[in-house]
Image (cartoon, rainbow, N blue to C red):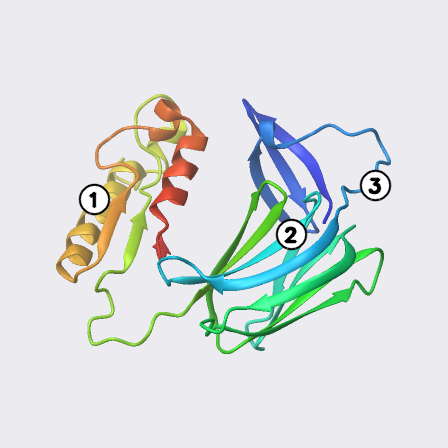
Amino acid sequence: TYAEVAGFSGKFLRLRVGRSGEAWISSKSAEDLPAGSPPPSGWLSGVEARPSEDGRREKIILELGKVGPHWFRHDPSSQWASLEIPGARMDPYQIHKDSSCVLIKSMDLMPLKEGEGAALNIHLSGPLWGWRTRIEGKKLVLELKKVPSPSPKPYQDLRILIDPGHGGDGNSWCFGASNPFGYPEKHANLGVALALKDLFLKAGAQVQLTREDDRDIRAEKGFEAVTGLIRDADPDVVD
């Protein structure tokens, strides 16, 4: 996966990924390399799949000498997904799947069809609710979230995070758009968010808001603090 720096704001870089994707990352997460440098590569020596500690996800841990670019692909119409790792070299490796995994049926490791690297193909038993990757030292961790089981109380214990956009009065972004009567978007967002919080709490959900009053949380604590709040909340639903 290759990305192009398309802009910057403060301590953040805007990346253009692929043909149309964009993402913001901390500049601390980027490393300058000379033009024409090959992607980082490492030996892939082991793959392990097991349920997360809370049972809400199943995770795949890949042992790599150096974690480089990677790309997750999933077609919702099929029961297959793949994690592609350009530059990864397949050492004599072991693949282990814990018998308590339900979502992950099987895995196999193959060379990339184009270029040097490896592709981990994952056979799923059902649809995905979500996924994410993270790096832990020399390990690449892929977490897959399974669809919650049907329940007569569908919101019971569901983790919901609501992010009311805008807030504060530092600049025009804080107010957002306005209706024909001049009512700012920031107030409408907060009003809806607070009403939703009450409804979801009564239905048994666990609800968290990024703000509960008229303030610009991003200006006060920084963009990383907000994304950290979302990450630490580990919600089933973000709105």
Instruction: Quadrant for residue 56, please give it.
Output: bottom left
Q: Callout 1: 10 Å neighbours few (<14), some, many (20+)?
A: some
Q: Amino acid at mark 1?
A: Gly
Q: CA distance from mark 2 to mark 3?
A: 21 Å
Tag nearer the camera, 2 or 3: 2
- For label 3, the SS is loop
The residue shown at (39%, 35%) is: 226
Q: Are marks 2 and 3 in contact (CB under 8 Å)?
A: no
The residue shown at (44%, 31%) is: 223
Q: Callout 2: 10 Å neighbours few (<14), some, many (20+)?
A: many
Image spot of residue 88 (x, y percent): 76, 52
Point out which mark residue 191 bears.
1
Q: CA distance from mark 3 to mark 1?
A: 50 Å
Residue in front for this viewpoint, 130 or 10: 130
Point out which mark residue 63 bears.
2
Number of marks present in the image shown: 3
- For label 1, the SS is helix
**Residue annotated with mark 3:** 38
- Residue closest to the far left: 202
- For label 2, the SS is strand
Image spot of residue 65 (x, y percent): 71, 45
Instruction: Quadrant for residue 182, please give it.
Output: top left
Image spot of residue 137 (x, y percent): 59, 40
